[in-house]
Image (tube, rainbow, N blue to C red):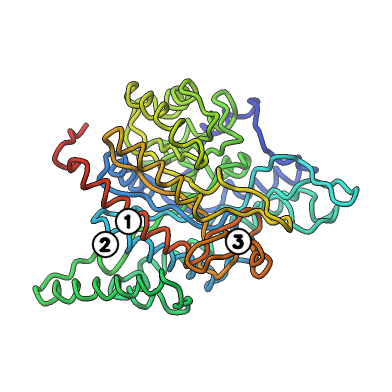
């Protein structure tokens, strides 16, 4: 792949949430270095994910996207990566077995190092410093040196992302993801929660099914490996541009920092730099939609990013909040359908339900998360279509960042293990709770709707 020039057209347009780099010469040297670095993902992998998202848009698959709110450079360890991968594999097994639907697995990892913020500065005890914008930009420590944006961090992020991808690919294709190890994925996790016990019972059922298949002489390759894709918010346009490459075989430009990138709620200006950049690359692209999204916004995104209305090209990740999803989402989905927009609709039930608890901890109630998912499914059922997927912030660790769930975490428990660099994540047990509940919703919805494989017409 050669460096693409197509991704430079965003320069000169309004670019929200970009760091105020103090030394532009250092930034140029770092991005020039990244422009010659090997791509982190390949064009063919991005095209394969677009095909899988096309299946989900038609109701023939379901997307499971999850991982850290914000990765940290010191957190790219084998144990941490394996824990998140285990959790996602368990959730995928629950969804696949419970709802009989293929699951497209996408990690919020190997690049989720930058975060948009509501304010460019933070004040503590009369001292005002730049806000923490993620490890790609600055450090969480509240000192002037730590909060100064440092372009050298972009190279560190690239290196950490490459190391994470190497481990993910080794785990996904080297036997760790073998479905015959469905019990082993639970090792090292707490087993005293209802979700863990329920998972073990499901794993035993899967074991029996595979034993029957082996007895019949059936042992397909797909049981031994898994497809796993990566994603992050494409926030820092200097970084994304430096890693944009042109595919020699097709002439198309790809953002090679991840298979899927999304435009966030704070950067989705239809006339802004982010929409312009993502209109120029061939990756599948997602856009986060909050409750202020209008039908005109939706059409503008589709016209700019997916003018040919290609299934799998564009996904909409809705983050409405439990109180708004049932009112706002139907209007947008009906407008999309009326205009031939063939997007994959995914729910993010986390970001619209965040609040600050006593003690200053940002948190989310598990019941609010579930209620937004229910609302998302109810809207799809009323419109006679299948939901496309779910996007959650989670970890494989036993953190206490979200309230409720099987262990019934309370406000007084938050301080016990609150480790997120930014927003609260579901822990392992809560993630399994969520997967079982979503599997039940999928079962109910599919019983109520016709089989899409029998009714669809291929383009």
SS of the residue at dot 3?
loop
Q: Is 436 above or below relative to 329?
A: below
> Mark 1 and 2 residues: CB-CB less than 8 Å, in contact?
yes
254 sits to left or right of 115 = left
Q: Which mark is residue 47?
A: none
Q: Is 26 above or below relative to 172?
A: above
Earlier residue among tags 1 and 3: 3
Q: Which residue is mark 2?
A: 97
What crowding class fits label 1: few (fewer than 14 Cα within 10 Å), some (14-19), or many (20 or more)?
many
Nearer to us of marks 2 and 3 is: 3
SS of the residue at dot 2?
helix
Q: Which mark is residue 439?
A: 1
* Whole-number angstrom distance, CA of label 1 to CA of label 2: 8 Å
> Would you identify the image quadrant in which residue 454 lies?
top left
Q: Which residue is mark 3?
A: 401
x 46%, y 30%: residue: 328
x 36%, y 54%: residue: 438
Nearer to us of marks 1 and 2 is: 1
Q: Which residue is nearer to you in this view: 361 or 237?
A: 361
Where residue 136 sits in the image (x, y, percent)? Answer: 66, 52
């Amino acid at each position: 792949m050669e460096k693409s020039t197509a991704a430079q057209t965003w320069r000169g347009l309004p670019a929200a949430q970009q760091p105020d780099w103090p030394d532009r010469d250092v930034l140029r040297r770092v991005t020039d270095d990244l422009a010659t670095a090997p791509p982190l993902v390949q064009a063919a992998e991005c095209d394969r994910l677009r095909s899988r998202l096309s299946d989900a848009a038609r109701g023939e698959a379901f997307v499971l996207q999850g991982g850290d709110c914000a990765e940290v450079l010191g957190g790219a360890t084998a144990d941490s990566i394996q824990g998140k991968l285990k959790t996602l594999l368990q959730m995928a097994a629950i969804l696949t077995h419970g709802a009989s639907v293929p699951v497209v697995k996408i990690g919020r990892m190997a690049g989720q190092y930058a975060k948009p913020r509501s304010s460019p500065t933070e004040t503590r005890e009369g001292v005002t410093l730049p806000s923490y914008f993620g490890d790609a930009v600055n450090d969480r420590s509240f000192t002037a040196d730590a909060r100064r944006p440092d372009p050298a961090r972009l190279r560190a992020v690239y290196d950490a992302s490459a190391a994470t991808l190497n481990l993910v690919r080794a785990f996904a294709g080297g036997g760790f993801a073998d479905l015959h190890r469905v019990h082993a994925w639970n090792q090292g996790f707490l087993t005293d929660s209802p979700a863990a016990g329920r998972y073990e019972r499901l794993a035993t059922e899967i074991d029996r099914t595979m034993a029957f298949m082996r007895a019949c002489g059936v042992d397909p390759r797909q049981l031994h490996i898994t497809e796993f894709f990566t994603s992050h918010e494409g926030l820092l346009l200097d970084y994304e541009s430096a890693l944009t490459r042109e595919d020699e075989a097709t002439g198309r430009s790809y953002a090679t920092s991840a298979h899927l990138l999304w435009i966030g709620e704070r950067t989705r200006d239809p006339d802004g730099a982010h929409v312009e950049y993502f209109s120029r690359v061939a990756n599948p692209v997602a856009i986060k939609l909050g409750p202020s999204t209008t039908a005109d916004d939706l059409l503008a995104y589709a016209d700019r990013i997916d003018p040919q209305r290609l299934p799998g090209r564009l996904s909409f990740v809705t983050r409405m909040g439990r109180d708004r999803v049932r009112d706002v989402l139907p209007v947008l989905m009906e407008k999309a359908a009326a205009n031939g927009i063939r997007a994959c609709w995914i729910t993010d039930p986390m970001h619209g339900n965040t609040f600050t608890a006593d003690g200053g901890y940002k948190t989310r109630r598990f019941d609010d998360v579930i209620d937004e998912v229910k609302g998302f499914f109810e809207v799809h059922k009323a419109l006679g279509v299948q939901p496309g997927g779910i996007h959650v912030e989670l970890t494989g660790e036993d953190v206490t960042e979200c309230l409720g769930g099987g262990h019934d975490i309370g406000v007084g428990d938050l301080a016990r293990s609150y480790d997120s660099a930014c927003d609260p994540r579901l822990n392992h047990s809560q993630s399994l709770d969520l997967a079982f509940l979503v599997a039940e919703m999928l079962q109910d919805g599919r019983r109520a709707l016709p089989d899409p494989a029998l009714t669809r017409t291929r383009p």
